Image (cartoon, rainbow, N blue to C red):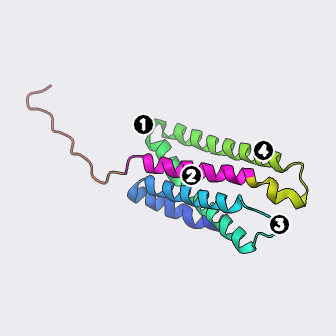
Amino acid sequence: MAVGATVCAPLAGRLVGRLGARLPLALAGGCITVSGLLLAGLGRHTSVVLLLSAYLLFGAGFGFANAPITNTAVSGLPPTRAGVAGAITSTARQLGAALGIAVAGGLVANTGPAGLAHASRPGWAVVAACGAFLFLVAHASRPHRTTTRPVPAPARGAA
């Protein structure tokens, strides 16, 4: 997961700066959806290659998601409120991580090592659904405009 996030986070920042948030969000949603679907079928005999691939995809999705989400939150407010938007985004991210860990822990709390993979399946299905939602949001959003409209000159004689 760490490798995927480390590689994709700076790439996402460059993509957001060049093309806007839509493409990195779509990549994040796609990676997270596929990783959740791969891990939703966990079992005793799941191969290490499948686990590593799924975790790499999940990390890549996480790396692609952070920059466009933060950019969208900060650019949606006037510059004087950008700090507030960044703080709210960071707080929401931390709260979501804490709740996600609590829910995932609750799903597998009373299972032994033999039943751990089976007990985690609903959690991975939720991850896949969240990734699919993120993918749909990315495709429903407005594309980034690369050109700007010129500001009209003030009329002569207007005060």
Residue 64 in view here: no
Q: Residues within 10 Å of mark 1 (few under 14, many from 20)?
A: few
x and y, in percent, of residue 61 in the image: 58, 59
The outermost residue toward the left is 157
Residue range corresponding to the magenta coloring: 122-143
Label 3 sits on residue? 44
Amino acid bearing label 1: Pro
Could you say whether the residue bearing mark 3 is in a helix, strand or loop?
loop
Q: Earlier in the sequence, mark 4 or mark 3?
A: 3
Mark nearer the N terminus (2 vs 1): 1
> Can residue 63 be seen from the camera position used here?
yes
Which secondary structure is most common in the magenta stretch? helix
The percent position of residue 125, horizontal first and vertical second, equals: 68, 52
| Above or below, 97 relative to 44 | above
Q: Residue at x 89, y 61 (%)?
A: 114
- Badge 4 marks a residue whose secondary structure is helix
Query: Disc 2 designates what residue?
Result: 132
Q: CA distance from mark 2 to mark 4?
A: 22 Å
Amino acid at dot 2: Ala
Q: Earlier in the sequence, mark 2 or mark 4?
A: 4
- Residue 30's quadrant in the figure? bottom right
Q: Residue at x 52, y 54 (%)?
A: 67
Per the model, the C-alpha gap separating discs 2 and 1 is 30 Å
In front: 122, or 84?
A: 122
Front-most of residues 103 and 156: 103
Q: How far across and how far down the image is residue 24, in percent?
A: 49, 57
**Mark 1 lies on residue:** 78
Assign the C terminus to one quadrant of the image. Answer: top left
Q: Which residue is mark 4?
A: 102
102 to 121, vertically: above or below: above
Q: Disc 1 to disc 3, how far (Cα)?
A: 52 Å
